[in-house]
Image (cartoon, helix red, strand yellow):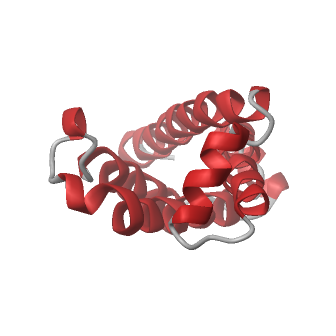
Amino acid sequence: MSGGLANDRWALVALRVIVGALFIVHGAQKVIAGGGGPAFAGSLAHMGFTPGALWAWIVTTVEFVGGICLVFGVFVRVAAALIVLEMLVAIVKVNVHRGFYWTRGGWEMPALLALLAAILAVTAPGRPGRAARRAF
């Protein structure tokens, strides 16, 4: 394999692992709190996601299990696509009214995470065996 393609492949591996690790950390906080806790479930219900507790666990699962899948290179396309969907919903339902800057709770960071996950959904291998061969 030529150096350019090999470097591209390793760049995608690095992107996959970093994005996965970020979502593991965010999902782990929610797992520890029992699906994000009652406050998270309540805020989801207030936004129209009822029952809130169910949606809190769905978000928790997408972040935590999706992050694990990205780190280990399994079900990458599905995990990344679900993360994109979650981030787009977060932008529309939570962040857009706060403006652009992430320091004010704006949509800058979820948009960046959605873009990075979209890159993985489009470019990453979909089958576990293939993922392992491509990653290493």
Left/right placement of residue 4 relative to residue 106 reads: right
Left/right placement of residue 44 relative to residue 127 reads: left
Residue 118 x/y as whole percent: 45, 63
Which quarter of the figure is the C terminus placed in? top right
Quick check: can you spot residue 123? no
**Picture residue at 58% right of the left edge, 59% below the top:** 44
**Picture residue at 36% right of the left edge, 45% below the top:** 4
Q: How many marks?
A: 0
**Picture residue at 75% right of the left edge, 68% below the top:** 51
In the depicted structure, whether residue 100 falls above or below residue 125: above
In the depicted structure, whether residue 74 falls above or below residue 97: above
Residue 87 x/y as whole percent: 46, 59
Quick check: can you spot residue 77? yes
User: Nearest the camera: 119 or 66?
Assistant: 66
User: Nearest the camera: 49 or 20?
Assistant: 49
**Picture residue at 56% right of the left edge, 73% below the top:** 48
**Farthest right residue?**
129
Left/right placement of residue 111 relative to residue 64 reads: left
Residue 89 x/y as whole percent: 46, 68
The part of the image, by quadrant, that contains residue 111 is bottom left
The part of the image, by quadrant, that contains residue 2 is top left
Residue 50 x/y as whole percent: 69, 71
